[in-house]
Image (cartoon, coloured by chain):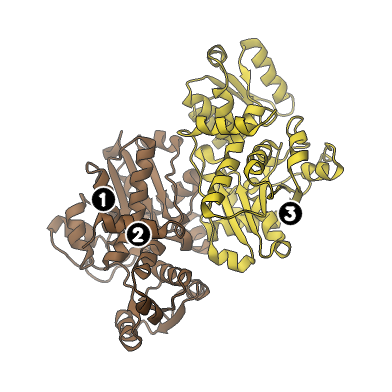
Chain colours: A brown, B yellow
Amino acid sequence: MLTIEMITQAAERLKDVAIQTPLLESPLLNNALGFRLLIKPECLQKTGSFKIRGAYNKIASLDETQRKAGVVAYSSGNHAQGVAAAASAMGVAAKIVMPSDAPRIKLDNTAHWGGEVITYDRQAGDRAEIARNIAEKTGATLVPPYDDYHLMAGQGTAGLEIAEQLDALGIQADRVICPVGGGGLIAGVSTAMLASQAETEIWAAEPCNFDDTKRSLEARTALSIEPGHSSICDSIVTARPGRLTFPINLKTLSGGYSVNEPDVVTAMRVLFTELKVVAEPGGAVSVAAAWSNKEAFQGQTIVALVSGGNVDMDSFLGWMI
Amino acid sequence: MLTIEMITQAAERLKDVAIQTPLLESPLLNNALGFRLLIKPECLQKTGSFKIRGAYNKIASLDETQRKAGVVAYSSGNHAQGVAAAASAMGVAAKIVMPSDAPRIKLDNTAHWGGEVITYDRQAGDRAEIARNIAEKTGATLVPPYDDYHLMAGQGTAGLEIAEQLDALGIQADRVICPVGGGGLIAGVSTAMLASQAETEIWAAEPCNFDDTKRSLEARTALSIEPGHSSICDSIVTARPGRLTFPINLKTLSGGYSVNEPDVVTAMRVLFTELKVVAEPGGAVSVAAAWSNKEAFQGQTIVALVSGGNVDMDSFLGWMI
């Protein structure tokens, strides 16, 4: 189960580890939009995404014996860096299973964080199975990307901060919009937000063709998206909601937004020019959802969580030119 | 005079107006550099630079009659937006004198903030004189870009935040490096920092050919730089230290760094890729100074204040390609 107490405990653990990212806004942009847009920029977090919050809380919840046996994770991106950095901060050995054709920078960064990178052939191997095998053989604990309550509690600390920061501003938000891949971040964020601000609606944002959570919420049952699509939003292209995250999200979320790629690029541009933050495509889908629903949001206060900023300069330049 | 009490009072006034920007760091970048680099990203501040802090504190210090008569300022950039936004937040009329050939976006933004833009011919007019004339004729108060104690006190709140944030992390900085144009920001920041962390050295960062403060500190007297140079660091290309700021800075600063343009571009790139923030060239000179003095800083803790992020996408792309 995921409780607000678990999230509060995670916040205590993360106090000197995670950066408390601010709530940013541009009154000029607000005027142009016709609603108040507050940005929670988790792209500014250590490792460039919120992932260190959950990974650290998960590893901190292990006992001495478990920590000695190390942890193992599979990811080609932000979760890999989050786990490697969190493990390194606690002196725990981390093995990270990554596809051999992952971008050099991601392999290198994971190794630089102190993670032992184990590559596999994307065509031949199943990374989850490889990670489970390592866990069984070595006694290491698997740190899954979203289907874990300690992990969700850690990600939820971002929501706790949003609630506290809104309180400090003396305002309530009409909606909080959050990028969704497997649904771990939004499960934590929605649980944290609704504990103190029950009137606020929490909405998922996903790339079109990967809007499995939106469709599943509408059908009130977990659905998979049909295969064969691609997206620039590489960090959140999951095929179906998580086994543990979806039952939570079905209770806490008001619905989902599906956004197209031109709006994602516009959102990255607006974040650059108006808020001065760098977002990766998957991190900017929340702002893309706000941008493309301007008419519906007139007069409201919207919080958009930007989940990551791990985009390489060349790709960014390519989208902006 | 500028006192720590004035800065503390300014912080109280700015509590619900300015964003408390975080201290950001990337442990990966720290490892690569060999020293701990903490970034104070004032580019994330409302209006895209620290300038709203000083402008708001200055206008808040005016009495009812003065506020009714409005304020006037001259600037082609960040100060214009800071004054317009601060005045608008307090319902005070603001006239901003700007060159008629200023970038459209800056003229537009200043107007959008509610400022009345008064343009002049850069070849024929003296903007300071035009502003003074308006002040005399209308009774409006001139809000100068740096030579004013209330203004410096407002800018100093960024330094107060740095001191508090270092305290919260349980660390002291060896150096704080701060971009310098007229010297108002660093006068406030150094006064605030040294009040609680007297061992920390405060250093100015300037573009080469506009390193008047560095040279003046070395000569122990205010010197002007020779005319005829240009720089991409448009927000801090002042010719000589301020009349009121320099005597303060002569007491509080340990020295200055002069940085070249390739290092400024590198700093902007590092801020983008490693810290996920957008800096304008003049805002990134502090990071350029840290970058180009890597060897001397080994093992130290360095805070680099990034003063602004008002760069247009096309210019940014041009530098990064």
Q: Chain of mark 2?
A: A
Q: Chain of mark 3?
A: B
Q: Position of residue A101 (x, y in %)?
A: 44, 79
**Camera-nearest label, 2 or 1:** 2
Q: CA distance from mark 2 to mark 1?
A: 23 Å
Question: Between residues A297 and B175, which one lies in front from this camera angle?
Answer: B175
Residue B260's tag is: 3
Q: Chain of mark 1?
A: A
Of the residues shown, which amino acid type is indicated by label 2?
Ala
| Upstream in sequence: badge 2 or badge 1 | 2
Q: Secondary structure at mark 2?
A: helix
Q: Which residue is mark 2?
A: A10
Quadrant in which residue A198 is drawn: top left
- The reply to whether residue A257 is in sight is no
Q: Position of residue A321 (x, y in %)?
A: 51, 55
Q: Which residue is mark 1?
A: A203
Do callouts 3 and 1 mark residues in contact (Cβ within 8 Å)?
no
Q: Are marks 3 and 1 on the same chain?
A: no
Q: Position of residue B64 (x, y in %)?
A: 53, 14
Disc 2 crowd rating (10 Å Cα; few below 14, some 14-19, many 20+) is many
Of the residues shown, which amino acid type is indicated by label 1?
Trp
Q: Is residue A206 left or right of residue A309?
A: left
Q: Which residue does the image show at 36% across and 51% down from the upper left?
A: A305
Disc 3 crowd rating (10 Å Cα; few below 14, some 14-19, many 20+) is some
Q: Secondary structure at mark 1?
A: strand
